[in-house]
Image: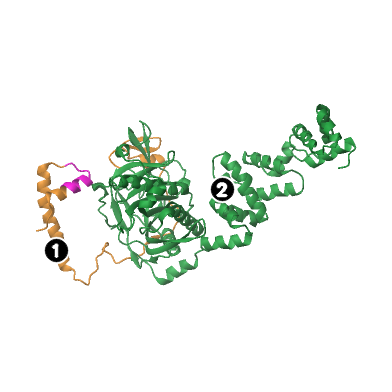
Chain colours: A green, B orange
Amino acid sequence: MNQTLSEPAPLSFDEALERFEPVMGFEVHVELNTKTKMFSSAPNAFGDEPNTNVNEVDLGLPGTLPVVNKTAVEYAIKLGLALNCSIAETCRFARKQYFYPDTPKNWQTSQYDEPIAFDGYLDVELDDGEIFRVEIERAHMEEDAGKLTHAGGSGRIQGADYSLVDYNRAGVPLIEIVTKPITGAGERAPEIARAYVTAIRDIVKALGISDARMERGNVRCDANVSLMEKGAGKFGTRSETKNVNSLRAVEHAVHYEIRRHAGILAAGGSIVQETRHWKEDTRTTSSGRPKSDADDYRYFPEPDLLPIVTDQEWIERLRAELPEPPAERRRRLREAWGYSDKEFRDVLAAGLMDQIEETVASGASPAVARKWWMGEISRVANAREVEPAALGVEPATIVELNKLIEEGRINDKIARQVLEHHLDGEGAPSKIVADRGLEVVSDDGALTAAVEKAMAENPDVVEKVAAGKLKAIGALIGPVMKETRGQADAGKVREIVLNKLGIEG
Amino acid sequence: MSEISRADVEHLAKLAHIAMTEAELEKMAGELAVIVDSVKTVQGAAGDDVPATSHPLPLINVFREDVVGEVFTSEQSLSNAPDAEDGRFKVPAILDEE
């Protein structure tokens, strides 16, 4: 908290990269979507009343006995396999002991020296298609902690009068994936950071083992960054930025920490080994807690749980259940849809591949699916400050909207309005068109009346058109659109005007 | 005799959030050394061919199917809480960590 004030200013990213080589490491926590918790049969569910998804095991009551969730173990093995890890023949749980009210037992049940999966790698695809290999140190099973709300004072931990604890999340199965130090990333370090976490998210989603929603904390990232002098080959002191919980934030946090470290080192200072907090509003980090005695967790084997022993048959059965790897699926879809590289990259960057795939499966052409998701839906999402995928537009809605356009019943502009009304809960597109009377005005009576009114109000324009300046008709279309609430067909308006003036279109 | 120093005990006391006086630290260092020595006799009994174990019974892979069981109501969860508010356990703000 205090040393930020006296810290030298961060260097620019380019200056930092001229002098230093960044080294990164990531700890990504994945919350599994099992029905029950890691060691108890209480439901693993989000958003319920506080302290109602708990039983005696989750509250750490004396004399209770945890029992391992078999599905969680199988999910961990699957993730290990997807990350090209070796699966331990024997592994154990351990107690990680610390005093903090988010765990009622005063320890977190985790794995220590015997993780279920180890020594893997993940080939991460960057924006330009280049592949960067990230080595995986281990993936281990553990349990999540409860949720603390700091009350009184400012609502933040500093100055809080007391804390309130909800243990619904306590005991939710987690897998923590730890990378080996990532070197050689250079100026692409922030991009690699984002691509790595994206790849993990895509894999756990494809495996179906997690809801993978970062905004809900299903995938959480701690980002370690250190710098070494170019050519020195010796790692510097690292900082660990905790809970960087969006893909963009991962990229920004690494970018900022590289600059901050470089600023301190270039001024002759030294890096404090500490945790940092990510601040989204300023895209900076602030000092958290230094490494201290409190990090002595006195791990020891969990005596209440038995070792997990895997055999080849079990592992091969799980391997056979692995889905198509996300990277291969991307290549397949890119080919099937016929998008350009840029179009496909934009779809990936927007996180809309699944939506487009579902929309195409529902009967839309790839071009129509892309037009809607990347165009209007993204625009509305942006205006409403949510992710496009979070708007909840069903593929069937897009297919229906497109059909209304193709049948000439609405135009593109009206279709956009229908989408907005649909998102505001007014029902299916055709219902909205009927309820609101949005169908394109094609009956000549209403349209002719509107055209006549516009011509009467704009005699100067009529004169120009009559004199052969056909482009001037545009000035009549506006008032007609206004009169018909945008439902007029522009071509039809032009036709009526020319007809009235006796001009050959 | 095992080496358990006064500093070791002080460190452990801090981690365990136990306040101890100087006299207690000294006394406990001596007592813990005796206890560790007693436990150490196990090492003499087990030969090199006996692997370390974390459980007295030779069991492995005791699992539970992923099926939801009974849970507490909010009232039951909080029935032993020293203090509660809004269905949550109320605890002192802990400022020196996290």
Residue wearing tag 2: A389
The magenta stretch is: B10-19
Q: In the rendered view, does A266 fall on the left or right side of A198?
A: left
Mark 2 secondary-structure assignment? helix
Label 2 amino acid? Answer: Ala
Q: Nearer the viewer, residue A326 or A63?
A: A326
Residue A480, above or below B28: above
Secondary structure that dominates the magenta span? helix
The residue where tag 1 is placed is: B41
In the rendered structure, find residue B19 and report the number of the disc placed on it: none
Chain under disc 2: A
Tell me if residue B14 is in the magenta stretch.
yes
Mark 1 secondary-structure assignment? helix
Residue at (83% x, 30% y) in the render:
A455
Percent coordinates x, y for residue B64 in the rendering: 40, 59
Q: Residue at the location (72% across, 36% down)?
A: A436
Q: Residues within 10 Å of mark 2 (few under 14, many from 20)?
A: some
Amino acid carrying label 1: it is Thr
Q: Disc 1: which chain?
A: B
Residue A64 visible somewhere in the drawing? no
Residue B11: percent from left, percent from top: 18, 48
